[in-house]
Image: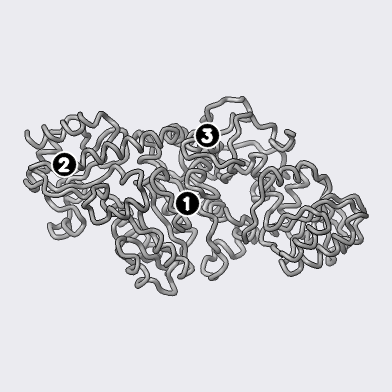
Amino acid sequence: MAEFGFDTLAVHAGAQPDPATGARITPIYQTTAYVFEDADQAASLFNLQVFGNIYTRLMNPTTAVLEERIAALEGGTAGLAAASGHAAQHLIFHTIMEPGAEFVSARQLYGGSVNQFNQSFKKYNWHVKWADATDPESFKREITDNTRALFCESLANPGGVITDLEPLARIAEDAGVPLIVDNTLATPYLIRPFEWGAHLVVHSATKFLGGHGNSLGGLITEAGTFDWAKSGKFKTMTEENPSYHGLKFFETFGDFAFCVAARALALRDLGPTMAPMNAFLILTGIETLPLRMRRHCDNALAVARWLEAHERVAWVNYAGLEKHPLYPQHQKYCPKGAGAVFTFGLKGGFEAGVKLVNNVRIFSHLANIGDTRSLIIHPASTTHRQLSDEARVKAGAGPEVVRLSIGIEDVNDIIADLDQAMRA
Amino acid sequence: MPTTYPDSLIARILRSVKTIAMVGASPNQVRPSYFAMKYLLDKGFKIIPVNPGQAGKEILGQKVYATLSDVPGPVDMVDISRASDAALGVTDEAIANKDRLGLKVVWMQLGVVNEDAEKRAGAAGLTVIMNRCPKIEYGRLSGEIGWYGVNRRTIDNRKPHAFNKGGSLTRG
C-alpha cells in the first residue's frame, strides 16, 4: 500500500467504518464481555489461537482502534492501551523484568516515574540505576549482566532536555537490551523514537495525544525490531508459558509479540485497563494532534522568546531558543518544534513565583501538562514542597522556578496574562 | 531477515489459494503451526498436514501424510513450518511434485528463511514467501488482527464484510 502521511494516519489509522452498523465514527463499545460462537471458538480465543474479543479487561474494539492508531503514528507493529501512563510503564516492566533484575533510566524524568521506579518497583525486587539523559555514555557505565532495559524520555519533563536517542539506541543494542522511550512530551508528531533505533515507546496519552485534559490513558507500542530470544534473558517472551499451556510468545507472534505478551499476561493479571470511553476521547483528540502540536510549539517559542527578554526573568530553559545548549539536538530530533512544556526562573525568587501563580487569569494553576489550555505550576510551593531546599534545587525545582505548559489560545493573550501577573 | 512483500501479493495468494499442504504440522496445541492450521481451517481453507512422525494419524480431523510426495493433489500452496535449514529439502520435494499437485506457491513460516530454497522455487516458476505466517497475514488483511491492536498498515473507508466469511479478503 501507499505510505500515508502523518496527518492522514492521525485521522484514519485503525478506524474502519463499524463492521456491524457502518457507523463512520468509532463507536464506544461499552461492554464488559463478548459472546462466543460456540465452545470450540471460546477455547480457541482463550488459547490465543484465533483473533477475537473475550473480555474488556483484555481487549475492546474501541480501544483496539486507539492501539492501532498509536502504532501507526509511531511506525510500530502493534499497540496496547492501559489506564494511565504509569499503568503502561508497569505493564512494560512486568513483561521485561524478573525479580532481582535492573534497568538503567535517565534521571531527568517526570517525578511520578522517579517514584514508581525508586519506590514501587523495589517491592517487586526490580532495581533502577540512574544515568544522565544528556550523556549517553553514562548509561553504558551502569549496564551489568543483570540489566534488562534502558529508559528515557525523548523530551524530558519539565523540559529543556532533548535526549540524544541515536547513540543511546546503539548502546542498548550492543548490550542486548531494549531502549524504552517515554515519548509523551514530544508525541510522534515531533519525534518518532523508532526512527532513531528505540525498541519500545510508552505514552501518557493523558497529555498531548488526548490533548484536552479530559481523559487519563497510557499507550505502549513496539518497533518489532528487538530479538527477544538472542540473550535468553527475556523469559516472559521466550519460555513456555504455563498459563497458556506452554505457548511461547515471541516464537508465536513474532514482531508484535511484546504487545501480545503484555496484554495476555501483564494486563490480564494486573488489570489496569483503559476505559472504552477514554479510548474514544483520546482517539478524537489524536485526530487534531498535528494541528494542535504546531500551534502548541509556535506559541511556546513565542512565549519563551518574550520571557527571555523580560526584565523580571532570570533565565528560560527551552531548547527551541537558539542559545540553548541543546538547540543542535532540537534541530536534529525535532525540527518542527521543541515542545510546549518548559521552565523559567524569576529574579524575585519564591515570593515572585507564588505571586505569579496567584495572579494569572488565563493560565490554570494545576499539576498537569499537555492541555489545550495554558497551565502553570510553581513546583517549590506545590509538587516539591515537602523536599528540603537542597533537594528542591537538585530536582530542578528551586524557589524561583516556574513550569509552563503552553496551550493553543491566542498567543498575545497568553503573553499579556503572564505580563500582568508578574507586574501585579 | 529482510523479507517484505507488497500487501497486494499476499492478498492475491490468500484469495486464490484453496488447498494448503502444511509441512511440519503439529498435533501439539501450543505450537505455532497448530495455531495457524486451526485458524486457516476456520477460514475455509482445505489443509493437508504433512509430518512423518504423525503419518496415518489425524490433526484437527485432517489425515496426516508422511511426505509431500504422498499427498494427493491438487495442492495450491506448500506452507513450511520447519527449521530454515530443512526448508531447502522440502522446497526441492515441492518442485519435484509441482506439476502433479498443481502447486503455485511455496510459503515459509515466520522465522523460516532459506534463500537457496527461494531461488530454486522461483526458478521453477513458483511464487515464494518467506518469514511470514499466513494466519497473521490473513488476520491483518481481513482486519481481524486489529482487535489485538496490531498495525495493519492500511486505511479502509469501507465497512468490512463479516470476518468469518473472509473479511476484506472476499472483495476482489
Callout in the foreground (3, 1): 3
Q: Position of residue A404 (x, y in %)?
A: 23, 42
Helix or strand or loop: what does disc 2 sit on?
Answer: helix
Q: Position of residue A12 (x, y in %)?
A: 52, 34
Would you say the residues marked 3 and 1 are in contact, meaning their CB atoms lie under 8 Å apart? no
Q: What chain letter is assigned to the residue under label 2?
A: A
Ranked by sequence position, the earlier of labels 3 and 1 is 3
Residue drawn at (71%, 46%) of the image: B10
Instruction: Say which element carries label 3.
Output: helix
Q: CA distance from mark 3 to mark 2?
A: 38 Å
Which badge, 3 or 2, comes first in the chain's sequence?
3
**Which image quarter holds the C terminus of chain B?**
top right
Q: Which residue is mark 3?
A: A12
**Circle nearer the viewer, 3 or 2:** 2
The residue positioned 50% from the left and 35% from the top of the image is: A8
Q: Secondary structure at mark 1?
A: helix
